[in-house]
Image (cartoon, rainbow, N blue to C red):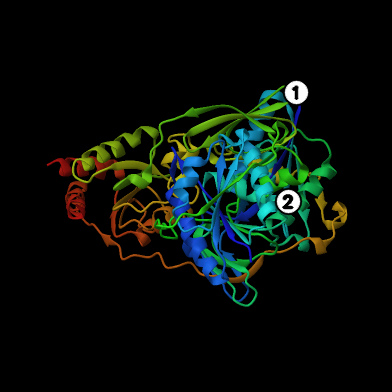
Amino acid sequence: MSDLLILVESKAGALEKMTLEVIRGAGGLAKELGTGVSAVVVGADTAALAESVATYGLNKVYRLEHPLLKDFQPDAWVAALEWLCKQIAPTIVLISHAFVGREVAPRLAYRLNTELTTDCTALKIDPTDKGLVRTKPIYGGNAVAILKTEGTPQVVTVRKGIFEPEEPTEAKSEVVSMAPPLSDAVIKVKSLKTVEQEVVELDKANVVISGGRGIAEKEDFEVLLALAKALSKTHGKVLIGCSRPVVDKGWMSSDHQVGLTGSMISPDAYVAIGISGAVQHLVGMIRSKKIIAINTDLGCNMFKVADFGVVADYKEILPALIKKLEE
Amino acid sequence: MKDVKIIVCAKQIPDPEAPFSNVSVNVEKKEVVVDAPDVISPYDENALEAAIRIKEELGGKITVLSMGRKVSDTVLRKTVAAGADQLILLEDPAFERLESRSIARVLSAAIKKIGEYDLILTGRQAGDWDSGQVGLILAETLGIPSISLARSIKIKDGRVEVEKIVPVGYELVEAKLPALVTVSNEVGELRYVARTKMMALLKRPMTIPKWSTKHLDLSAEGLKPVQLMELCPPPDMKRECVFIEGASPEEKAGKLAAVFRELR
């Protein structure tokens, strides 16, 4: 049986933690199948990244190199990965369920004439037919589907944080250079420019203070910021989050969004202000160590998952709380 | 460029914002039961809003395409009230619970039947399964460029220019038309439709074509349902909530401050 293949992702030249998680997950499946795991590094110059991933117990590390693969251009990446998969015919392809995977995996699976399951939270091998059994939360997390699909390779994207990151080993994997035959013609979507904006990394915060639909006006986030400032004196890094409606209204950029399509976080404390608790939001913050909810509606879902609840108007309680914290 | 022909794919789903106490799992039937009215998947509403803005600027025609086993035109008529010109429903028992590639096959057959188009818009993912596949696969099926996660869309001389959300901010990308764009919520919510307008529209006769496998020249055998082995209730998320009581906001605030001090 051929190897499993995982896609390596990096940020500023360093391996992403989610890639190490996928390596660990793939390793478990490979053991069940009695085969190994290989990895593919995509880019214009992949030497350094291939070297660093080669210490994680992989069978082979493929360097998929071409000038057109320099930045993440989906058209070129999909074409290159399609070519590689047709060369090496992996049994299973695993990709992190993040920015690159969300875009590449559906198109790659389609071109390989196979079905994809996205955002899996558990994977195992069916011992009877060696098929990949996928666990995927659906309806925002209100139900959990366990499913199989047809076609080879079996392709999945994997939710962040469900596997522990793999540890490096002494042994070095074999590094194989592959030059995909790409031409400019594959690029149908042209990148004109990338505008970098200041983005918050909510997963680095000790405390996240989030506002939701219950926040009456954009200006009211000032009082959340004031609370963040007061707490940051004693509680480490405190950042502002929000639920989806706040982003929809254009009050906050999407990097602040917590939930299924935003950040999935587990801070020491999560403070939910005026957030009723749609499941799509809850899945993003339910692993927080302590959850504190402030809401005027005693019946809201957020109180059901909170450790502490205050039934109050944030406009009254927050200024008073800031004062008390500063005493 | 004038008169842009836009197709918006909109899925009807149980309200994803329904409180979780209204959602249950029928393990035997492998069904999610939602005690709430159906709605248009929120990201598809964002896609429609993006389409209406293009039409307002350049003129054109918006066709809304919706598929399922039982699509309700009362739910979908909201799209016409908001600014769509034509509603087409794809309805067939064979369209129930299909896997993403089969859904894309049905949609592409319908789009070929519609004929000419410049732009296809879909939500970034549907609010029930959150797979985020159909839009991108549909573009592959039709052999047209695809751009995902749009926060803003502009049409310029036969091209579409999109601000695409990327981890560091946004990327400005362009493609020749026809193209497919998946839309994210940053585009903004679908405009408010007054209830009176909605009611008037429900009474007005409207031709809503309903196409099944027959009309689309599709064989039901080629359409594959999702291979669901099991459907389970979610893991319990409940915690024991300690409510902070007090006669005044100050008193509650004092107790809450003590909770925060404990956390350190």
Q: Earlier in the sequence, mark 1 or mark 2?
A: 1
**Visible in this render: residue A142?**
no
Specify the amino acid type for callout 1.
Lys
Where does residue B94 sit, x and y in percent of width and height? 77, 62
Measured Cα–Cα span from mark 1 to mark 2: 28 Å
Label 1 SS: loop
Q: Quadrant of the C terminus of chain A?
A: top left
Q: Residue furthest left?
A: A327
Q: In the displayed structure, would residue A34 be above or below residue B251?
A: below
Q: In the displayed structure, would residue A143 be above or below residue B72?
A: below
Specify the amino acid type for callout 2.
Ala
Question: What residue is rendered at 76% in x and 46% in y?
Answer: B141
Label 2 SS: helix
Classify residue A139 by image quadrant: bottom right
| Mark 1 chain | B
| Label at residue B68 | none
| Mark 2 chain | B
Disc 1 designates what residue?
B2
Disc 2 designates what residue?
B104
Question: What residue is rendered at 77% in x and 60% in y?
Answer: B223
**Visible in this render: residue B171?**
yes
Q: Residues within 10 Å of mark 1 (few under 14, many from 20)?
A: some
Of the two numbered discs 1 and 2 in the rendering, the one whose residue sits closer to the viewer: 2
Q: Residues within 10 Å of mark 2 (few under 14, many from 20)?
A: many
